[in-house]
Image (cartoon, helix red, strand yellow):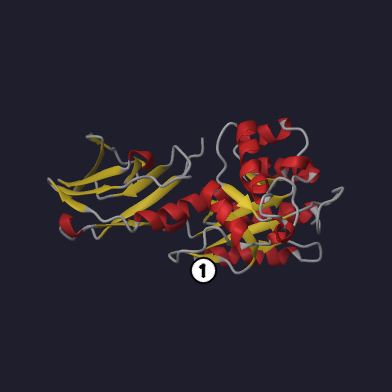
């Protein structure tokens, strides 16, 4: 079950409760975010990428092609260790070549196959060849919460992006590792989200533009000690999309304070946990008439699936 640790801030604490607003801190309370995504189910992902990531306790996203993903066992093991399994279509043909009756199989059919194989709905999709057509995008919107697109700038906090075309930074054989480190540093300094699009790795049989194992290792080492949320694409994207959703929810006066009510939108994963910052000396959060005890940082764990939250003044 996908679990997201979300940090929300109730501002301003000195204003009477009836005017308080619900404000979410971007990127799970970190300065920025980085997600490593791997395309095509290349054999080097299992032999190189996953071991290197597991060694550093970093989780990534693996976009699989249903018709050529090979044995399911290693991918189930990857999912069990926290990596995201996502869809890269059924056959990885160029979407511009799809006939109208083929789009359903490439998107919904692939999603259904992967859901049956892994036991839960998929959050994310990646466009084959980063090619996007209006018809394909319309199909994806019905089955996936998020979709990764092609190359582009880092994604800033606070500005709602196109959830079905989240741009990425593409790794290439000829690119120097300092460029990858620069993407990471930029995410931290600019408060943004860097999505790495990686294909083959050194020693691959058929992966596109493979990068060296040493470059992958150096990049992972560079990111792990930063003040960055390093998490799978679907986890960060679902956080960000819910942030934009919840910041539009209006609070209403309630006895002793305020309350927020929302209906969880379709396609969001179950088990989302939000952490809300309060002033424990003057405020109390409740869900289902139960007070939530804050941790040492004053953060309260809130169940997003409950669809309701109360703030009371002490």
- The image shows residue 144 at horizontal and vertical percentages of 55, 48
Q: Which residue is mark 1?
A: 190
User: Is residue 132 depicted above or below 37 in this figure?
Assistant: below
Query: From the image, which quarter does the C terminus lie in?
Result: top left
Residue sitting at x 77%, y 66%: 175
In-front residue for pair 242/129:
129
**Hey, which quadrant is residue 50 in on the image?**
top right
Furthest residue toward left: 255
Q: Can residue 38 be seen from the camera position used here? A: yes
Q: Indicate the secondary structure of the residue bearing disc 1.
A: helix
Residue sitting at x 27%, y 44%: 309
Horizontal arrangement in the rendering, residue 42 relative to residue 271 (left or right): right
Horizontal arrangement in the rendering, residue 87 relative to residue 236 (left or right): right
Residue sitting at x 54%, y 65%: 155
- The image shows residue 297 at horizontal and vertical percentages of 35, 47
- The image shows residue 47 at horizontal and vertical percentages of 79, 40
In-front residue for pair 47/221:
47
Horizontal arrangement in the rendering, residue 127 relative to residue 241 (left or right): right
In-front residue for pair 236/222:
236
**Hey, which quadrant is residue 210 in on the image?**
bottom right
User: Is residue 180 depicted above or below 78 in this figure?
Assistant: below
User: Is residue 124 depicted above or below 169 in this figure?
Assistant: above
């Amino acid at each position: 079950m996908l679990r997201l640790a979300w940090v929300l801030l109730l501002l301003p604490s000195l204003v009477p409760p009836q005017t308080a607003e619900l404000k979410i801190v971007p990127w799970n309370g970190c300065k920025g975010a980085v997600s490593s995504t791997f395309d095509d189910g290349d054999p080097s992902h299992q032999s190189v990428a996953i071991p290197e990531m597991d060694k550093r306790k970093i989780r990534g996203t693996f976009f699989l092609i249903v018709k050529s993903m090979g044995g399911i066992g290693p991918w189930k093991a990857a999912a069990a260790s926290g990596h995201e399994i996502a869809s890269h279509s059924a056959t990885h043909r160029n979407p511009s070549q799809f006939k109208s009756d083929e789009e359903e199989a490439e998107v919904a059919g692939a999603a259904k196959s992967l859901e049956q194989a892994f036991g839960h709905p998929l959050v994310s999709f990646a466009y084959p060849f980063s090619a996007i057509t209006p018809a394909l995008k319309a199909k994806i919107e019905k089955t996936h919460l998020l979709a990764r697109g092609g190359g582009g700038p880092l994604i800033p906090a606070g500005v709602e992006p196109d959830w079905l075309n989240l741009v990425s930074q593409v790794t290439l054989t000829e690119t120097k590792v300092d460029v990858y480190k620069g993407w990471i540093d930029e995410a931290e300094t600019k408060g943004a989200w860097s999505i790495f699009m990686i294909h083959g790795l050194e020693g691959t049989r058929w992966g596109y533009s493979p990068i060296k194992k040493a470059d992958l290792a150096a990049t992972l080492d560079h990111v792990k000690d930063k003040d960055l949320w390093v998490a799978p694409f679907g986890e960060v994207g679902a956080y960000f999309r819910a942030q934009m959703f919840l910041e539009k929810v209006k609070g209403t006066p309630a006895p002793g304070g305020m309350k927020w009510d929302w209906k969880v939108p379709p396609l969001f994963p179950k088990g989302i946990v939000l952490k809300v910052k309060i002033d424990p000396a003057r405020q109390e959060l409740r869900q289902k008439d139960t007070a939530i005890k804050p941790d040492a940082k004053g953060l309260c764990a809130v169940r997003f699936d409950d669809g309701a939250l109360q703030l009371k003044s002490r």
